[in-house]
Image (tube, grey):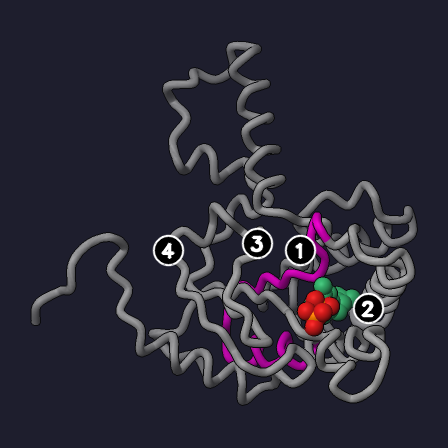
Amino acid sequence: MKNPTDPQHVAIIMDGNGRWARQRGMPRSFGHRAGVESLRRVVRHSANLGISYLTVYAFSTENWKRPRREVSFLIGLLREYFRTTIGELHAMRVRVLVIGDMAPFPADVRELAEKARTQTRLNDGLRLQIALNYGGRADILQAARTLAAQARTGELDPAGIDEACFAGCLHTAGLPDPEVVIRTSGETRLSNFLLWQTAYAELVVAAECWPDFDEASLERVLAEYRQRERRFGSVRRES
Ligand code: FPP
């Protein structure tokens, strides 16, 4: 049930799959596979709670630096996720899309992502953004390039570039900024996630690794968020 003080847009840095697996004497791939199950659970619960937008960091622009085998495994998981989960998401009326530059991914994975987008585009439930080959800096750069190209042709007056105009060129165009960013596994960095969009987001760090993050964890984070006082650079409101 939706609480009026809950965030509209939740963003998650799903961290700690590798450590979770190692703690169990298992390969990192085991943790990534468990991470997909955790994602399924959290998407379902977010939809049940009435959250409007959920953005998850699944593969960053820096993740290509991982060993080739791990990158291939993650791409395989992504393929499997799209193939096996879109039906369930569609049935839950979830609208799915990818943010990031899909160009380096294999053609079939790009097609699956596009098929997921078109199949679910009219759904009116949770809107799920999966960040793939996404980086906050790359996002800002591509927006700057778009605006520079428009200015060069005279279509745009540089003096008219304001925050709304800039935000409209980011991968998240049309979405409200996330009010809360969750990072699991106790780490306290943003790691190049949604750099523009998180200017005033509340960062909540969950101690558990991503595969252990469940429905109760999400509710605990929302409870913590409700306790935060958001001032947006202003001062506390006197009652
Ligand atoms: C962080 O754990 C996780 C990732 C870089 C990949 C996130 C991927 C998933 C949750 C599953 C794949 C998702 C889809 C949609 C297929 P880590 O590997 O950085 O863990 P560590 O910090 O303990 O090494």
What segment carries the magenta color?
Answer: 40-62
Q: Is residue 52 magenta?
A: yes
Q: Position of residue 19 (x, y in %)?
A: 71, 77
Of callouts 2 and 3, the N-terminal one: 2
Q: Position of residue 93 (x, y in %)?
A: 65, 69
Which picture quadrant has residue 57? Answer: bottom right
- Which label is found at residue 201? none
CA gap between label 1 and label 2 equals 14 Å
Q: Position of residue 233 (x, y in %)?
A: 24, 52
- For numbered disc 4, what is the local secondary structure? loop
Q: Is residue 42 left or right of residue 151?
A: right
- For numbered disc 3, what is the local secondary structure? loop
* Residue nearer the viewer, 137 or 143: 137
Q: Which residue is label 2 attached to?
A: 81
Which picture quadrant has residue 84? Answer: bottom right
Q: Amino acid at mark 3?
A: Phe
Of callouts 3 and 4, the N-terminal one: 3
Q: Which residue is label 4 attached to?
A: 200
Q: Is residue 169 left or right of residue 178?
A: right
Of callouts 1 and 3, the N-terminal one: 1
- Which label is found at residue 193? 3
Ligand 1: give its quadrant: bottom right
CA gap between label 1 and label 3 equals 9 Å
CA gap between label 4 and label 1 equals 20 Å
